[in-house]
Amino acid sequence: MSSEDITSDDVKNVKTDSNVEKPKFNTEDLLKDLKDVREEAKNYRLKNKAISSEFDLFKMETEAKIKSFDEEKTALQSNIEKYRTMDKRIIEAELKAESVLAGIRDTDLIKMIDTSNIKMSDDGSVDKSSIINSINSLKESKPFLFGEDKKIQTSSNAKTNAKASDSKIDAMKMSNEEWNKEKARFLRG
């Protein structure tokens, strides 16, 4: 028999079993349980909203701190690059000065000097011995790039040179004897 074959008379004739228990539901208990479940769900929603708000606030604060740290990092990296550039210029100036004193023939040749061992100290000075060692390394490997060492003019030999240049000799005021002595020197220049 299919469900299409069942008629309304068949439904009326169905006998119920008296042994089957009817469910015992107390509507008041069900309503109270439903109210409790709704209250508990409301509390969970409120807690979730509070936690979400705290998380969003924490997230915003953290993102702001990260942005601040990134800006500070960028500024520090920029400063580091500026200091490295300044250090490099100071090293180049010191290297040029020492190279000229060492008798380098052309300052363009300074680029050939290995500067990897030359470092700046914390006080901003350059280690002169490391510069001299670098110059000497090039001088040993390519001596033709260098002439004679230049002497640093000190105050004692500056006075001597000043006296020599101050005492100009006037050939017109010389006697023939003095002229003959000094003639070769004058003609050499």
Image: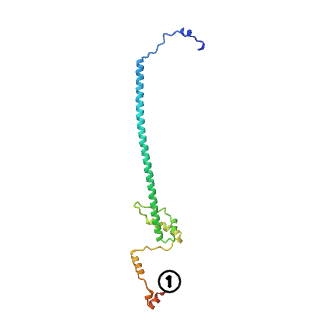
Q: Quadrant of residue 9?
A: top right
Decide: is 134 above or below 157. Answer: above
Instruction: Identify the residue shown where x is 46% and y is 59%.
Output: 85
Under circle 1, the secondary element is helix
**Amino acid at dot 1:** Arg
**Which residue extends farthest bottom?**
176
The foreground one among 169 and 153 is 169
Q: Give the percent coordinates (x, y) of residue 69.
A: 43, 48
Q: Give the percent coordinates (x, y) of residue 135.
A: 49, 67
Label 1 packing within 10 angstroms: few (<14), some (14-19), many (20+)? few
Instruction: Identify the residue shown where x is 41% and y is 40%.
Output: 58
The foreground one among 93 and 151 is 93
Decide: is 72 above or below 90. Answer: above
Instruction: Say which residue label 1 marks.
Output: 188
Please count the marks in the image. Answer: 1
Q: How is the image coloured?
A: rainbow
Instruction: Identify the residue shown where x is 43% and y is 86%.
Output: 170
Decide: is 6 above or below 155. Answer: above
Decide: is 76 above or below 5. Answer: below
The foreground one among 77 and 22 is 77
Q: Quadrant of residue 166?
A: bottom left
